[in-house]
Image: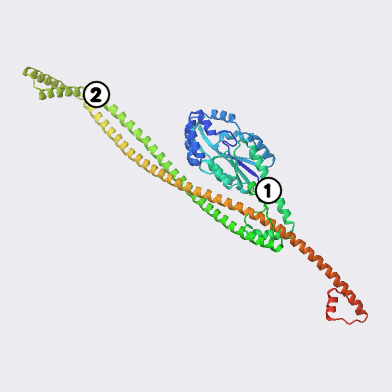
Amino acid sequence: MIKLVVFDLDNVIIDGEAIDEIGKLVDVQEQIAEITEKAMNGDLDFETSIKERVKLLEGASVEDIKNLANEMKLMEGAEDAIKGLKDKGYEIAVISGSFDLIADPLKEKLNLDYLFTNKLEEKDGKLTGEVTGPLVEGSKADVLNSIIESSDISVEECIAVGDGANDISMMEIAQVGIAFNAKPAVKEVADIILEEKDLKEVLNIITDLNSEATEEATEEATEEATEEATEEATEEVKTSKEADKEPKTKPKKSKKDALPEVDFDLAPTPEGVRKQKDEREEIIAKIADEREEFNKIAKEQRKIRDELNDDLKENLKLAIELRDKRNEVNKSVEEAKKSRDNVNEELKKLEWSSGRRDRLKLENEIKKIDKIIETRVLDIKKENQLVKNANDLRKQLMDIQEDEKIKDEAQNLKKISEDHHAKVVELSTQAQDFHENMLNYFRKTDDIRTEADEAHKKFVEARKSASAKHEEFKVVLSEIHVINKELGTNKSKRRKSEKQASTKKNREEKEKAEDIFEKFKHGKKLTTEELLLLQKHDIG
């Protein structure tokens, strides 16, 4: 029996994506929506996506977010569905990568038994851009397992409802996974797909599932009432290697798991029926082996995929660490550049104030005159005038004296500027190394993601093949049920007939023995056979 129903929050309990709505408060909704779409489709791991999106929310008002939480619209049928489930005795959990500021008010409003979300860090009434919580690095399966470990509930008693890629982990371990208005990647692993955005459909589905489980248990109890039918069914289960697979009372995952009705033509004789049974048991054993082989392949590919995803997560983590280090070093580069430029600005002012400006101006004018004298043909009068002008400028130049104190200070500033520049070069090289290593890890991540996608594709194909074989298995199993019922009825009739014949024979023998004894009392000699007959019925 189902005991716990687990829901995602965004686009399941509430009609919208909380982080997108928060993004509108600081005008970053478009950037957030792009990252969200990649995460929901499984193209970006959740930890990276949540951190990148929350970083964009830095500076958002906590008070505005709380007001937003009160305005968020619940999904159609959410209150009715949860109330209906609670009235039927189910426990309700919400496991979401969304945030406490949005989800906390719903715990009391919807009477939730469990609520797990991430926490938006805040300071002075504003978001810091940081996020913590069980769904940042951990998976929803981890959280669901923690609930199970602390209660008397098993995974076979859980139903998980979700719409995005980060819901897949909990849907895969739950007894039933329901894809609610979900992304394609979620539909591939779901047991039940609901396209209508009305949570009352989830209530109807769960009610039907438990009704089917009760009917199945009743049907099996009825079958067990006939001793011969039970023995045949046990033999059949053992033959098909299903005896130790699942307990009989385990609820079915969905309507598709019910045995189909079959129109099977039974042989006209008991011998023919038994031959049909042998043939069907041989067929079902082969189908079971083929199904198990596909399940084995699916399990192997799932393991490969999960290991690759772990590697992917580790590579992304390293790449992000390198990116953060690069960014930190680049900050230091900018600080060193700023310090160098400030020193150069002070040096420039100092040099101009020390008379250097006037010296440079005079030196340039002298160079111009000398070049004219050297390169042009001039009359003697004009050339003499230029020579005189140059000599006058040289006299002025000799009269300008640089302040020695300022000159020493300028030299010191030059040394400081050179040190800052050397630091800029050193840090820039270090930042470049971090950047190149980061790119290598991102390239490796892309390669791993490609391999993981291929393994997931093989996993889905194998599981579809296993499901097809399971459908074949159920058809043949239904046929065997029909055969078993027929064999069980024939045996009962035969045994009843044999019992009646045996009773009649005993009665006739006893009457014969009594007649022999009467004759013996009157002097009749008895044969050995007659003596044995008297002993058998304890006469005389």
At label 1, the amino acid type is Ala
Residue in the foreground of this view, choosing between 18 and 258: 258
- Residue pictured at 32% horizontal, 36% vertical: 424
Which residue occupies the foreground of this view, 230 or 35?
230
Label 1 vs label 2, nearer the camera? 1
Q: Quadrant of residue 514?
A: bottom right
Answer yes or no: is residue 124 visible: no
> Percent x, y for residue 220?
70, 53
Classed neighbour count for the residue bearing mark 1: other residues with Cα under 10 Å, few (<14), some (14–19), many (≥20): many
Up the image or down, 445 lies above or below 25; here it is below
The amino acid beneath tag 2 is: Trp
Q: Could one spot residue 436 in this view of the protein?
A: yes
- Residue 383, x across and y down, in percent: 8, 19
Circle 2 sits in a helix, a strand or a loop, which is it? helix
How packed mark 2 is, by other alpha carbons closer than 10 Å (few <14, some 14-19, many 20 or more), is: few
Q: Nearer the viewer, residue 169 or 369?
A: 169
Q: Which mark is residue 190?
A: none
Residue beneath label 1, please?
A: 213
- Spot occupied by residue 157 in the image (x, y as percentages of width and height): 64, 47
- Which residue is tagged 2? 352
| Lateral position of residue 165 relative to residue 205, left or right | left
User: Of label 1 and label 2, which has the lower sequence position?
Assistant: 1
Check the image and report above or below for 466 versus 77.
below
The residue lying toward the viewer, choosing from 17 and 349, is: 17
Quadrant of the drawing holding the C terminus: bottom right
Mark 1 vs mark 2, CA separation in Å:
94 Å
Q: Position of residue 189 (x, y in %)?
A: 56, 45
Residue displayed at 69% across by 39% down: 87
Callouts 1 and 2 close, C-beta under 8 Å: no
Q: Is residue 390 left or right of residue 76?
A: left
Give the residue at the far left of this rendering. 380
Q: Is residue 489 left or right of residue 103?
A: right
